[in-house]
Image: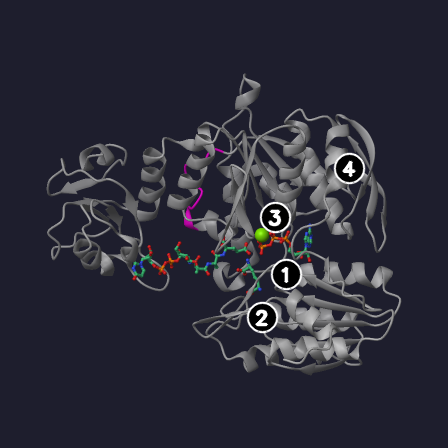
Amino acid sequence: MQLKDLAACLAGSVIIGDGSSSCQNIQIDSRKVVSGDLFICLPGHTVDGHDFAAQAEAKGAAALVVERHLPGSRLPQLLVKDARLAMAVLANVYFHFPSRKLKVIGITGTNGKTTTTYLLDSILEHAGKKTGLIGTIQRKVNGEAYPMSGTTPEALDLQSYLHEMVESKTDYCVMEVSSHALEQGRVKGTEFRTAIFTNLTQDHLDYHKTMEDYRAAKGLFFSRLGNGYAEQEADRKYAVLNADDEASAYFAKQTAAEVLTYGVEKKADVQAFQIKVTARGTEFHVQSFAGAADITLQMVGKFNVYNALAAITAALLEGIPLETIKASLETVKGVDGRVEAVVEGQPYAVIVDYAHTPDGLENVLKTIKDFAEGRIITVFGCGGDRDKTKRPLMGGIAAKYSNYVVVTSDNPRTENPQQILMDIEAGLKDPQTATTQYELIEDRREAIHKAIEMASPGDVVLIAGKGHETYQLIGGQVHDFDDRIVAKEAIRGLTK
Ligand SMILES: CC(=O)N[C@H]1[C@@H](OP(=O)(O)OP(=O)(O)OC[C@H]2O[C@@H](n3ccc(=O)[nH]c3=O)[C@H](O)[C@@H]2O)O[C@H](CO)[C@@H](O)[C@@H]1O[C@H](C)C(=O)N[C@@H](C)C(=O)N[C@H](CCC(=O)O)C(=O)O
Ligand SMILES: Nc1ncnc2c1ncn2[C@@H]1O[C@H](COP(=O)(O)OP(=O)(O)OP(=O)(O)O)[C@@H](O)[C@H]1O
Ligand SMILES: N[C@H](CCC[C@H](N)C(=O)O)C(=O)O
Ligand SMILES: [Mg+2]
């Protein structure tokens, strides 16, 4: 591809230097540049990609995309107003607009995205479709799974993953769409068939500053979806919204797509009734525009009914019969690190869960309270360099539903771990919950050992926040750490 052809895709862009220069691949990280690459200089949150142009040049870059002319570089440059938007456009051009060649179903919301993608992926597979998946735990393409470092990839990676799916004749991609991704334009140029909303509760206020800004970021998903009714069914666009979450009315107003709702409390197109949560699963009756069914999930928690309803609604819109949906949902054993039981023959329950928001923690604790025979002992922490205001809230929630709380580290990153523990402690000291005993143990391994040593028959130990994660981020270091392995070690009475 020649620079002048790329310039033709970006209105208002200006070529400085030789427009006939040819580039092989696109790269946004100077450390990965190889000879012949087009290096896009992204102004980041921590560093500025323009500062790495010289490194990219030294490694053989053929041309640059810049937001400001770099006179020090001898490379031809494509001057654009917004390098992130240019990345999304160029990635789509380079990979031939892959989202137009398969059906992409995206899921946004504070909690439940990963779980809902897994449920929907399972239903679509059960119905004989070839699926791909992109999200927090992994991405899947052509039956192979690859690890992920975030939830929603950068536009360049995203388009390359979608392209791989197209190449392997995938019918559907089910993917998580984070608010960071929407705000940063990572999904720009991706054509979604359906946009699902799970819920909006507090998180990420370090990044979005206010709940209104956070909601507005999620709103971009719906405002960019569809431009009215399409004659061909395959071209129709759907917004699947949670009738019980008040943000849904705002999203419904923003979208030109057809709106379908799901829920429990308020009347919805797909609604659950007679919910029964046990220690082994969750039963409910669903009524929809395409029939009714009784469904028994192997997953525990009323919140999983919402996740299932979201998946059911999107699947019904793809014409999948409710009986097929029911059969598939009933086979799903659970999602890695979500209300995952650690079983090592002990006479008390140990549950690892990925709750890392106030609402997530409250939901999982409420669920446990419904079936716990003995005490609830909760081990949890809050991430460093992330929303500080959720810390005392989570402390208060842990205290409200637990008999004993061990506050510990959860990826302190560059923050002082002890300070994070103290921020959480502020919520535990609340006069309303002050009767709950707690302690602060910075070392997560020690904290888990302590909780498990305390457990008696019938008790439930909840280890929250890290779920499937297999690391602990401290300072700039990545340490191996898996709550499930450490819990098993502790149960077996192994020493550190
Ligand atoms: C705040 C945020 O979202 N930051 C993301 C963003 O970073 P950034 O744009 O600030 O990039 P930067 O590190 O300042 O670098 C700027 C540019 O210089 C380049 N560079 C940098 C160094 C170098 O030596 N050479 C070089 O070329 C970088 O490749 C980049 O192009 O783009 C980076 C590259 O894609 C991401 O890795 C990074 O995610 C950081 C690590 C992160 O923690 N993100 C979290 C908050 C996030 O996005 N989370 C959501 C899930 C949230 C949820 O819903 O729960 C997600 O979707 O993953
Ligand atoms: N629908 C829901 N409503 C509220 N809480 C939920 C819901 N579904 C799951 N949770 C809680 O949130 C945790 C995370 O769930 P999940 O991984 O599915 O969410 P996510 O939106 O993908 O999170 P992330 O933003 O980190 O990608 C679960 O472990 C559970 O405790
Ligand atoms: N997607 C979430 C994951 C949080 C998981 C928790 N273990 C933490 O590190 O805070 C985030 O990036 O905020
Ligand atoms: Mg997720």
Distance from mark 2 CB to nearest ligand 3 atom below 8 Å:
yes
Mark 3 and mark 4 lie on one chain; the one further toward the N terminus is 3
Q: Is residue 147 above or below residue 192?
A: below
What is the crowding at mark 1: few (fewer than 14 residues within 10 Å), some, or many (at least 20)?
A: many
Q: Could you give the CA–CA distance between mark 2 and mark 1, rounded to whole angstroms?
A: 11 Å
Q: Secondary structure at mark 4?
A: strand
Give the quadrant of ligand 2. Answer: bottom right
What is the crowding at mark 2: few (fewer than 14 residues within 10 Å), some, or many (at least 20)?
A: many
Main secondary structure of the magenta stretch: loop
Q: Nearer the viewer, residue 148 or 427?
A: 148
Magenta residues span 184-191
Give the residue at x 24% y 40%.
24
Q: Is residue 249 above or below residue 372?
A: above
What is the crowding at mark 3: few (fewer than 14 residues within 10 Å), some, or many (at least 20)?
A: many
Residue with the mark numbered 1 = 467
Distance from mark 3 CB to nearest ligand 2 atom below 8 Å:
yes
Give the label on residue 410, or none: 2
State left or right for residue 226 relative to residue 440.
left
State left or right for residue 248 relative to residue 69.
right
Q: Position of residue 99 (x, y in %)?
A: 45, 32
Give the label on residue 271, or none: 4
Q: Position of residue 329 (x, y in %)?
A: 74, 39
Distance from mark 1 CB to nearest ligand 2 atom below 8 Å:
yes
What's the residue type where badge 2 is placed? Asp
Mark 4 and mark 2 lie on one chain; the one further toward the N terminus is 4
Quadrant location of the N terminus in the rendered image? top left
Q: Position of residue 336 (x, y in %)?
A: 65, 54
Q: Is residue 132 above or below residue 408?
A: above
What's the residue type where badge 1 is placed? Gly
State left or right for residue 1 relative to residue 29.
left
The answer to whether residue 82 is visible is: no
Residue with the mark numbered 3 = 113
